[in-house]
Image (cartoon, rainbow, N blue to C red):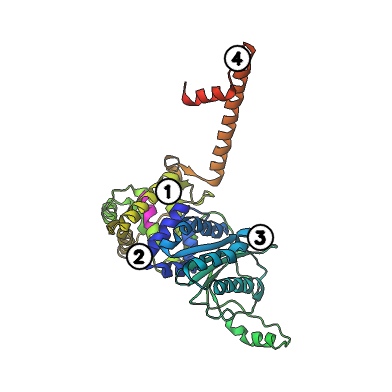
C-alpha cells in the first residue's frame, strides 16, 4: 500500500503541484476513494490510519524533493506531531510554532468545541514547504463503536472558530452542539463574556460523507455507469487496444481496469468521488470485499506507475501523461456509450479469477503465514530428531547443519 499510495501522490504532485495534493487530502470523498483504490476496506475507519501511514512512510524520505511532509498518526504517534513539525519547520525555514499552534487548535476544536461524542485518537498533519497544510484527524465514539473523521485545509481555516472544516465523515448524530458553526457566533461571544447559554446547531455547509454499516460492497454503493465505462475500456477489444496505445504499454484487461480507476483518483474532479466504493474495483479489499486483493495486478499497477515516474524524472513525460489520457478516454466512453456495469456478474468474475491473480485477504495472508511457521517448526523438529539419532550412533551432526542441508537441497 505504501508504494501505490506514494506513486499516486507523486503523480498528483507532478501534474498539479503540492497545493492540489493538500486540497485533495482535505476532501473526504477523494480521501476515501484513495484508500479504496489502494486496497483498503472501502467503508472502514481503518482507511484513515492506513492512508496516512502509507503516505508518511513513502513521502517523508523524499520530503525535500517533493516539498511535503507527513506528521503524526494514531495513538502515541499523534503526540509526536509537535516535535515532528518543529523539526521539519526548522530544516526549511518555516514558523514551527505557528504550525504547532494550528495542530493543537484543530485538535481542541474537534475534541471539545464539537460536542458530538467522539474522542480523537488519530491526528495527521500534512505540511508543504510553502507552509500550507491539511489536517486529517479521527475520533471514536466509545458507546457506538463508530468513528468520525475531520478534514481541515489551511486556506479554508483562516478562522478556527468559524466553519473551519472542509469535510466531516461519519454517521449523522442528529442535533449536536457545534461551537465553530457560523450560526454559533453569538454563543461564542456569550461564552467569552461568561454569559450562560447553550446554543444548538448542526454541522452545515461542509461536505459530509457517511459510510454504511454493512461490510460488503453493494450495487447501491456504486455509480454503475461510471464503473461500466471502466470495464468497457478494459475488456471490450475496440476500446482496450486504444487504451493500451494511450498508455504506451501493452497491458492485460485486469491491469487496465486497475489503472483506469487509479487514473481517475489522480486526475478526476471532486464530483467524480461521490461513490468511493467504486474505486475498490481497482484492487479489491483486504477484507475480501468486493473481492480479494489481486496481488499480481497490484504489483503490475505499481510497476507501470513507477516506470512512468522514473521516465518523467529524466524529461520523458509521455508515459506519465498516459494516465491523464486514459482518464479522459474513459469519461468519453461514459458520455458517448453510457455503458452500465452488471454488478453481480462483475463481482462473480473477479472472484472467479482471484486465485489466478494471487487474490489475498488479510485473513488468508495471516493463515498462510501461520502455516509457513508451522511447517518451519515441523522441519526443525525433524532435524532435531535426526540430529539426536546421529548422535546416538556416535556421529556429531547439529540440527542447524541438517536444516541448512535441507534448504540447499543437498
Label 1 residue SS: helix
Q: CA distance from mark 1 to mark 4?
A: 48 Å
Q: Residue at x 59, y 23 (%)?
A: 399
- Quadrant for residue 296, please give it: top left
- Which of the numbered marks, if any, corresponds to residue 167? none
Q: Could you say which quadrant of the image residue 18 lies in?
A: bottom left
Q: Is residue 257 magenta?
A: yes
* Image location of residue 78, percent across then percent down: 60, 62
Residue 251 placement, left or right of 272? left
> What is the C-alpha distance between the residues marked 4 and 3?
58 Å
Which sits earlier in the primary sequence, circle 2 or circle 4?
Answer: 2
Mark number, residue 390: 4
- Mark 2 sits on what residue? 15
Q: Residues within 10 Å of mark 2 (few under 14, many from 20)?
A: some
Q: Which residue is mark 3?
A: 145
Taking 380 as reference, is 274 left or right? left
Q: Earlier in the sequence, mark 3 or mark 2?
A: 2
Magenta segment: 255-260
Q: Residue 280, position in %: x, y?
A: 46, 55
Select label 1 or label 4 by which is in front: 4
N-terminal of the pair, mark 1 or mark 2, is 2
Q: Provide the residue designation for mark 1.
A: 298
Q: Nearer the viewer, mark 4 or mark 3?
A: 4
Of 35 and 88, the residue lying toward us: 88
Main SS of residues in magenta: helix
Nearer-N-terminus badge (4/3): 3
Mark 4 neighbour class, 10 Å CA radius: few under 14, some 14 to 19, many 20 or more: some
Are circles 1 and 4 on residues that touch, CB within 8 Å? no
Amino acid at each position: 500500500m505504501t508504494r501505490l499510495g506514494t506513486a499516486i501522490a507523486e503523480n498528483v504532485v507532478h501534474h498539479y503541484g503540492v497545493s492540489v495534493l493538500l486540497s485533495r487530502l482535505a476532501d473526504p470523498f477523494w480521501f476515501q476513494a484513495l484508500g479504496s483504490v489502494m486496497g483498503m476496506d472501502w467503508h472502514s475507519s481503518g482507511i484513515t490510519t492506513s492512508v496516512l501511514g502509507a503516505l508518511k512512510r513513502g513521502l517523508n524520505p523524499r520530503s525535500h524533493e517533493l516539498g511535503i511532509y507527513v506528521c503524526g498518526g494514531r495513538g502515541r504517534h499523534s503526540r509526536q506531531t509537535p516535535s515532528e513539525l518543529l523539526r521539519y519547520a526548522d530544516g526549511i525555514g518555516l514558523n514551527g510554532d505557528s504550525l504547532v499552534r494550528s495542530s493543537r487548535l484543530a485538535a481542541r476544536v474537534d475534541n471539545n468545541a464539537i460536542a458530538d461524542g467522539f474522542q480523537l485518537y488519530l491526528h495527521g498533519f500534512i505540511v508543504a514547504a510553502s507552509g500550507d497544510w491539511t489536517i486529517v484527524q479521527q475520533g471514536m465514539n466509545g458507546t457506538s463503536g463508530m468513528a468520525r473523521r475531520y478534514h481541515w485545509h489551511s486556506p479554508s481555516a483562516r478562522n478556527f472558530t468559524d466553519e473551519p472544516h472542509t469535510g466531516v465523515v461519519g454517521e449523522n448524530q442528529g442535533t449536536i452542539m457545534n461551537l465553530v458553526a457560523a450560526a454559533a457566533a453569538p454563543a461564542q461571544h456569550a461564552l467569552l463574556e461568561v454569559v450562560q447559554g447553550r446554543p444548538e446547531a448542526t454541522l452545515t455547509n461542509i461536505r459530509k460523507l457517511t459510510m454504511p454499516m454493512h461490510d460488503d460492497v453493494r450495487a447501491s454503493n456504486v455509480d454503475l455507469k461510471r464503473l461500466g465505462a471502466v470495464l468497457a475500456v478494459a475488456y471490450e477489444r475496440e476500446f482496450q487496444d486504444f487504451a493500451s496505445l494511450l498508455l504506451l504499454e501493452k497491458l492485460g484487461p485486469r491491469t487496465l481496469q486497475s489503472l483506469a480507476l487509479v487514473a481517475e483518483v489522480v486526475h478526476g474532479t471532486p464530483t467524480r468521488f461521490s461513490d468511493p466504493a467504486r474505486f475498490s474495483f481497482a484492487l479489491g479489499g483486504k477484507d475480501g470485499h468486493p473481492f480479494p486483493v489481486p496481488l499480481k495486478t497490484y504489483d503490475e499497477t505499481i510497476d507501470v506507475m513507477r516506470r512512468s515516474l522514473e521516465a518523467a524524472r529524466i524529461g520523458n513525460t509521455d508515459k506519465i501523461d498516459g494516465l491523464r489520457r486514459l482518464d479522459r478516454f474513459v469519461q468519453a466512453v461514459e458520455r458517448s456509450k453510457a455503458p452500465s456495469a452488471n454488478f453481480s456478474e462483475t463481482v462473480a468474475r473477479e472472484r472467479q479469477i482471484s486465485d489466478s491473480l494471487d487474490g489475498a485477504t488479510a485473513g488468508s495472508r495471516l493463515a498462510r503465514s501461520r502455516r509457513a511457521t508451522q511447517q518451519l517448526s515441523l522441519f526443525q523438529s525433524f532435524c532435531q530428531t535426526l540430529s539426536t539419532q546421529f548422535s546416538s550412533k556416535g556421529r556429531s551432526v547439529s540440527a542447524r547443519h541438517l536444516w541448512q542441508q535441507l534448504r540447499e537441497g543437498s
